[in-house]
Image (cartoon, helix red, strand yellow):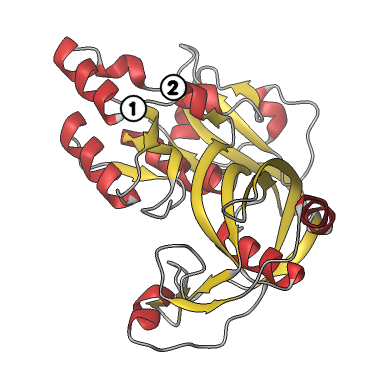
Amino acid sequence: MIGIITLNKPQGKTSHDMVYFIRRTFKTKQVGHTGTLDPMATGVLPILVGKATKLSDILTAENKEYIARIRLGVTTDTLDITGNILSEQKVLAGEDEIKNVLSSFSGEQMQLPPMYSALKVDGKKLYTLARQGITIERTPRKINIFYIDFLSYFPEHHEFEIKVGCSKGTYIRSLCDDIGKALGCGAVLTALTRTKSGNFSIENSYTEEDVLKALDNGNLESLLTKIDDVLDDFTKAVAFGDNEKKVKNGIRLRPVQLGIKNFSLGQTFKIYDENDSLICLSEVILENDTPVLKHLKSFY
C-alpha cells in the first residue's frame, strides 16, 4: 500500500511511537512522518507509507497551524508545563495587554530554538545535551508567523489560548516563552494541538482506534490519501511512447519533448505515463544552456 495517512496523535505518544504503530499495522517497514510533535502535543501527524516516504522533505516543508494554551507567571527549563520550574512571577497583564503583545509577533522574525528540541548541532540532538545539564549556543532561525489569533482567556488560571499559523521550523514553546518575556512575567506552554499541516487537517485525521477498526474490517487502504492528491501544486505532463522509457532510465529530456511549452527554471513537474500512473517529479534546470528536466523523485 502506498499513500499518506493523517493521524490525530494522542497526548503522551511520541511521533516515533506513531510511526511504529503504522509500521506494525500496515505490515511494512517503509514508513515515515512529516514533522515531529512533542509527546505532550496532540493533533495532525501525516504518516507516509510505502513510496510516499519519498515525499517527506516536500511535506515537512509545508506550513502548520496550532492551537496553544499558555500560562503566564511561570517559566520552566523545557518552556512547557512538563519541565522544572525556573521562576514564578506575579501576573499583572490582562486580556487587553495580551492582545496588544500578540499583534507584535506577526510576520517574519528570528527565533532561538529551545534546548529541549530534536534539532541537531554537530550531530547531537539538543535535548540529549539538555538532559545532561549542558546548554550550548544556538543560532536564531528565520520563521514566519502568518497569523496569531487570540481565542480565549482564563483569568483565574492566568491562561489564554491562541491560534497560530506559521512556517516550518517554528517552535511554539519558544513563541510562548517570547510572549511571556514581552509581558514581563514569563510564560509556559500548557497544551498544544496541531490542527493543520499543509493540506492535512485535524477534521480529516484518524485516531489509533479508527486505524484498528479499519484493520479489522479489511479496509486499511481506504484511510490513505494517494500521492497524486498531495501534488496539486505541480503541473502535470505525460511521457508517451519512447519518452516514457527515457524518463524511467533517468534521461534528461527537454520540456518540449513532453509537450511542456510554458515553464520556468526551477519549476517542478509531475510526470505520468500513458496509463496515468505517476512516474516521477522533475525539475527544470539548465544543462549546457539548454533547459532539461532533472529527476527529483521516482515512483515507479
Q: Which residue is mark 1?
A: 2
Percent across and percent down for residue 267 are 71, 40
Which quarter of the picture shows residue 67? Answer: top right
Q: Is residue 107 visible?
A: yes
Percent across and percent down for residue 101 are 81, 59
Asked if labels 1 and 2 touch by Cβ distance under 8 angstroms, the answer is: yes
Percent across and percent down for residue 228 are 51, 23
Q: How many marks?
A: 2
Q: Residues within 10 Å of mark 1 (few under 14, many from 20)?
A: some
Percent across and percent down for residue 253 are 61, 37
When the figure is inspected, residue 19 is found, relative to residue 88, above or below; the finding is above
Which quarter of the picture shows residue 184? Answer: bottom right
Q: Residues within 10 Å of mark 2 (few under 14, many from 20)?
A: some
Real-space Cα distance between discs 2 and 1? 7 Å
Q: Quadrant of the N terminus?
A: top left
Residue shown at the point (40%, 81%) measured from the top left: 130
What kind of element bears circle 1?
loop
The residue type indicated by label 1 comes to Ile
Residue shown at the point (67%, 72%) measured from the top left: 185
Q: Quadrant of the C terminus?
A: top left
Q: Which residue is mark 2?
A: 226
The residue type indicated by label 2 comes to Lys
Residue shown at the point (57%, 48%) measured from the top left: 68
Q: Which mark is residue 223?
A: none
Q: Residue furthest front?
A: 156
- Sequence order check: which comes first, mark 2 or mark 1? 1
When the figure is inspected, residue 96 is found, relative to residue 203, above or below; the finding is below
